[in-house]
Image (spheres, helix red, strand yellow):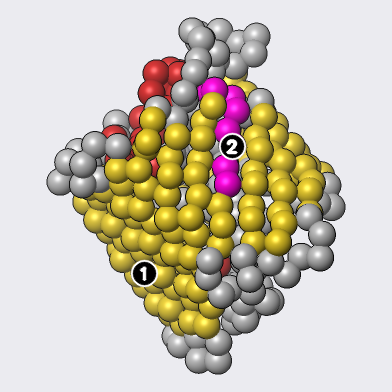
Amino acid sequence: MKKFVFLFLLISQNIYSYPTTITKYRTCKTCHLTASGGTILNDYGRGMSEAFMSTWSTEDEAREFFIDDSSSFDWGMDYRHLTLSGGRLGSPVNFPMVLDFDGAIHVNPKLTLVGSIGYFGSERVLESRENYGQLELFKMSTLRFGYFISNLGINTNDHSLAIKRIAGLSRGSETYNIELWNLNDWFQTFYTVSSKEFYIENGDKNFYRIATPDGSQAHRLRFSTVMVPKWEFGFNYLTSDDYKMNGIFVKGSLFKDQYIFYERDVAENETAIYARTGYFIFKGFDFFTEFDTYQNSVSRFTNFYFGFDWMVRPRIELSFKINLGQGEDQGQMHLWL
C-alpha cells in the first residue's frame, strides 16, 4: 500500500546538505560550520541559499536575525512539521517534528563551541542533541570533540535510511566522539572514535540490535577522493568489539541540474543499499526517485519513492514523496533544509 508524505518546514536557519551543493562543492565546510554539514551555515552558505538554492529570495534574507557578519556568535532555528497519510495508517498523522535552536561561539579564529536544545518527535521531548568543540589544528585538519552524530558515507540527513541504521547513525543516536578530519583538493578523510555505547536499531524492519560493552569504543573511518570534478568516490569502515561494517559510496553529477547518490554497506549477514537520482526542474525545485533497501538472514524490505523537494524561499521548504515499495515503514521521511 502507498503512503503519502508531506513535510512542511518554516523559519529554518539550519540549512542541511542539498543535492545541488553536494555536487557543486567538494566539501560541506564550504557552506557549513563543520565538514560534516548540517548545524549552522557560514556566511557563504547563507549567501548561496539565496543565490541559487531557493526559488525566490531577497537580499540578506538567509542571514541570522539580529546578528551581523562580524559577530563572534552564530545561531540557527529549525522548525519542521510532518504529515503522514495512507498506507497502514488508519488516519493521517500530523505533528511538529522538530523545534530546535543551535548556537556557536567563536572563541578565537581556531576554536568554536557549539550547543543545541530543542523539542523532537511527536512526544515533544526536550533534548540537547549536539554539544561539541571544534579546533582547527592546521590549515586542512580539524579536531571535533563532544556529543554529535559522526560522519559516514554520503552523509544524507535522512537518518531513517537503512545505510544510517546499519552504521548506528539513526536519528537520536548521537554519541560522545572525538573526530579528526583532513580535507584537501584531492582527498577527504574522517576518523571518529565513539566512546559511548551504540546500537543498531531494530523493530519493524528487524534490524539486529548490536551494542558495544560499556566503556568500549567504536571506530569509524570515512575516506574519499574528489579528484574527478563534480564526483566523490569513497569507502566506509566501522569496527567495535563485536561488530564490523564496510561499504562504498558515490555521489556526483552527469550533467547540469542532475545528480546521483549511491551507497552500499555490508555487515555480517546484513546489507543496506541506498540510491537516489534527481533533477532540478527549475531553481529550488528538485524532483527525485529514491531506493532504500535492507536485508539480513531472516528478512528484507525495500522502499521506492517518487517525490520532490522545493525550497520556496531560503527559510521555507516543502517536501513530498510517495512510497511504491514494500517496506513496513512505508513513507517515513526525514528530509529537510
Residue 277 position (above or below residue 269):
above
According to the image, label 2 marks what residue?
A: 318
Image check: 242 left or right of 130? left
Q: Nearer the viewer, residue 299 or 70?
A: 299
Which residue corresponds to the image point at 24% horizontal and 56% vertical from the top-left? Answer: 233
Query: Percent position (x, y) of residue 203?
Result: 69, 76
Element at badge 1? strand
Q: Nearer the viewer, residue 93 or 179?
A: 93
Query: In this picture, which residue range is highlighted in magenta?
Result: 313-320
Query: Percent position (x, y) of residue 136?
Result: 40, 33
Which residue corresponds to the image point at 54% horizontal and 27% vertical from the top-left? Answer: 312
Query: Percent position (x, y) of residue 49?
Result: 45, 24
Image mark count: 2
Q: Which quarter of the picture shows residue 287?
A: top left
Most common secondary structure along the magenta stretch: strand
Query: Percent position (x, y) of residue 223?
Result: 29, 56
Earlier sequence position, callout 1 versus callout 2: 1
| Amino acid at pointer 2 | Leu
Residue depth check, mark 1 versus mark 2: number of the one nearer the observer: 2
